[in-house]
């Protein structure tokens, strides 16, 4: 049972992978210039490489005391560079995972009341004015039926991370439909709940996360409640929410979605829904002046195209020349 990590240079134009001999070469670089190289990792062993970590270090021999300070690494070509990098687990006989990312912040729409979402959106409503984009967010106005909205640019997948910011007022709910059965209607109904009759001992200005199983158009009184979280705290405006869907497990973040560990989790032991689908935004019909707002939609889907970028920025005043060497060290915390 071993881990065997092999390294491949990635062509920046074609994406073609070429196996390396454990050496990356930037070729000839002039003082004051910058260059980037991309590579990836394949685990040809039969064991998981757990939590690999990479670090730029001074080469141990030869007196290369300056050049390692020119280099930084990142999983993104354009940002996030540093001298250390944490990688996801690398499964046996698998490439380093990357992410396909889809985002919508609604900032490209006109800031005019009554602007409707573009043709990439499928909307379910009664009133023609139930859904609009205004002030940089998707807004659901009071309607005679509960609302659904599907952004068709999202990726059809079984497992993914989904981020969304929401404003959920007292007396209503909003959330997403996950793993639907192909009808954008039946599946896991995952809500930020603010209806008093469903909050239990939680204060009315707070909220809970609830997971139901059912057909959305049948109404909440006909859904099966599977899970209720502790209080998420006082609901605010444009609160960030993150859901990680993997297998029969859902992990939840609310408020700070950058935390390493989720605040709450739910495991469906019966694994009721396992189909790949796109998340569908859901909301209560609303009443009076109660509107619901959505913003900062982001979906991250793992792929087998993870890429590590090495950026080399040569000091314009460096006195060194000729071949320079830097060590890129990698270690992993264990094997599964």
Image (cartoon, grey):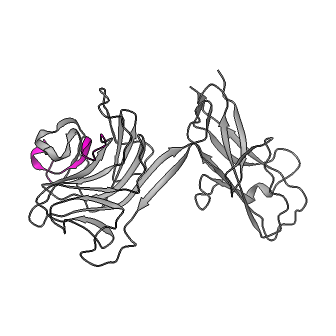
Residue 178 in which image quadrant: top left
For the N terminus, which image quadrant? top right
Residue 74, position in %: x, y? 62, 53
Q: Is residue 250 above or below residue 105?
A: above
Residue 98, position in %: x, y? 56, 47
- Towards the viewer: 184 or 226: 184
182 in magenta: yes
Query: Which segment did they paint magenta?
Result: 181-204
277 in magenta: no
- Give the residue displayed 13% in from the left and 52% down from the top: 204
Residue 246, position in %: x, y? 41, 37
Q: Is residue 137 above or below residue 158?
A: below
Query: Can the viewer see residue 202 in this picture?
Result: no
Residue 285, position in %: x, y? 14, 57
Locate residue 330 relative to residue 102 in the image: left or right.
Answer: right
Residue 317 in which image quadrant: bottom right
- Towards the viewer: 313 or 23: 23
Query: Can the viewer see residue 141 in this picture?
Result: yes
Residue 227 in which image quadrant: top left
- Give the residue displayed 26% in from the left and 51% down from the top: 175
Locate residue 16 relative to residue 256 in the image: left or right.
Answer: right
Q: Is residue 125 above or below residue 93?
A: below
């Amino acid at each position: 049972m071993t881990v065997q990590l092999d390294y491949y240079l990635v062509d920046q134009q074609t994406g073609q992978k070429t196996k390396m001999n454990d050496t990356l070469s930037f070729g000839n670089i002039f003082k004051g210039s910058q260059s980037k190289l991309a590579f990836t990792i394949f685990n040809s062993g039969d064991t998981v490489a757990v939590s690999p970590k990479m670090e730029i270090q001074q080469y141990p021999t030869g007196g290369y005391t300056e050049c390692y300070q020119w280099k930084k690494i990142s999983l993104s070509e354009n940002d996030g560079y540093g001298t250390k990098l944490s990688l996801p687990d690398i499964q046996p006989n698998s490439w380093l995972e990357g992410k396909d990312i889809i985002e919508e912040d609604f900032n490209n729409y006109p800031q005019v009341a009554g602007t409707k979402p573009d043709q990439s959106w499928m909307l379910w409503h009664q009133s023609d004015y139930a859904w609009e984009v205004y002030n940089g967010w998707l807004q659901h106005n009071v309607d005679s039926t509960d609302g659904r909205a599907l952004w068709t640019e999202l990726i059809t997948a079984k497992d993914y991370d989904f981020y969304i910011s929401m404003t959920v007022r007292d007396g209503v709910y909003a959330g997403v439909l996950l793993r639907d059965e192909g009808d954008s209607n039946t599946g896991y109904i995952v809500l930020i709940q603010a209806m008093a009759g469903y909050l239990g001992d939680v204060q009315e200005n707070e909220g809970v996360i609830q997971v139901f199983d059912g057909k959305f158009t049948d109404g909440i009184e006909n859904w099966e409640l599977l899970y209720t979280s502790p209080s998420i705290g006082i609901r605010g405006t444009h609160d960030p929410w993150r859901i990680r869907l993997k297998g029969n497990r859902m992990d939840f973040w609310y408020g700070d979605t950058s935390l390493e560990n989720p605040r709450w989790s739910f495991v469906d032991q019966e694994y009721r829904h396992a189909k790949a689908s796109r998340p569908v935004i859901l909301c209560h019909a609303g009443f009076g002046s109660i509107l619901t707002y959505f913003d900062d939609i982001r979906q991250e889907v793992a792929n087998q195209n993870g890429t590590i970028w090495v950026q080399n920025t040569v000091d314009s005043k460096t006195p060194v020349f000729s071949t320079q060497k830097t060590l890129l060290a990698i270690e992993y915390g264990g094997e599964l």
